[in-house]
Image (cartoon, rainbow, N blue to C red):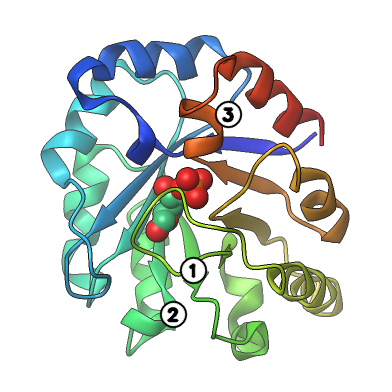
Amino acid sequence: MAIVSPSMLSANFLHLQHDIDFVNNSNADWFHLDIMDGVFVPNISYGLPIVQTIKKTAQKPLDVHLMIEKPERYISEFKQAGADILCVHYEACLHLHRTVQAIQQQGMKAGVALNPHTSVDLLRDILCDVDMVLIMSVNPGFGGQKFIPQSLQKIARLKELIEQTNSQALIQVDGGVDATNCRQLTQAGADVLVAGSAIFGAENRTMVVDELKRS
Ligand code: DX5
Ligand code: ZN
């Protein structure tokens, strides 16, 4: 069974409670929250007040994906806002190992995200120290983009590296994930599926969550 993390970027912000309730009552596992600063990625999403607000009624862990420059500046702020898992981009961190340790010292799980052009081999030396690796299967910044098929090979290669290094890291995949590709993703080694438009844009959201879960 995959871990399913619906991306709230595709939720209806006029009726956010309704969409939070949907996730609470579904078989989904986490809330995926995308934080964008308009510098690391060309888009600006939402920030700490929305994370705090979601935390008040979310009954599942908050999986926070930081698409921001120098994310080490905000680790304690996101902890206070309610993040349970904090994921930073490899490309945005100069001292990635230090940042991963700082996240864990604050009592959160630490994830490292890789853009489509970043090789998974670059993480080899710190794989044992991270709790999760996020393979971006689109260029980060927007929901509703098309899945990049080469991501499957990256997942398979990362799985190999995790086994070779006896790492416990989970493999998360984010971008263009839907009911048509979820099976291939979990077969390649993905443990956590993030989906935004495939879930919130569906007529039957419950069915999509269950299909992703079963993949
Ligand atoms: C993209 C974000 C994703 C996004 C996924 O930069 O990291 O989490 O919400 O959206 P879909 O599932 O629509 O591709
Ligand atoms: Zn994301």
Q: Position of residue 128 (x, y in %)?
A: 66, 73
In the image, is residue 113 above or below residue 122? above
What amino acid type is highlighted by mark number 1?
Answer: Ala
Which residue in the structure is indicated by mark 1? 113
Q: Position of residue 162 (x, y in %)?
A: 77, 72
Mark 1 Cβ inside 8 Å of ligand 2: yes
Residue 209 shown left or right of residue 41 in the figure: right
Secondary structure type for disc 1: strand
What amino acid type is highlighted by mark number 3?
Answer: Asp
Which of the numbered marks, if any, corresponds to residue 29? 3
Q: Earlier in the sequence, mark 1 or mark 2?
A: 2
In the image, is residue 82 above or below residue 165? above
Q: Earlier in the sequence, mark 2 or mark 3?
A: 3
What's the residue at 63%, 18% (across, down)?
A: 27
What amino acid type is highlighted by mark number 2?
Answer: Tyr
Which of the numbered marks, if any, corresponds to residue 56? none
Query: Can residue 37 be seen from the camera position used here?
Result: yes
Q: Residues within 10 Å of mark 3 (few under 14, many from 20)?
A: many
Residue 27 shown left or right of residue 138 in the figure: right
Q: Position of residue 33 (x, y in %)?
A: 35, 43
Q: CA distance from mark 1 to mark 2?
A: 6 Å
Q: Residues within 10 Å of mark 2 (few under 14, many from 20)?
A: many
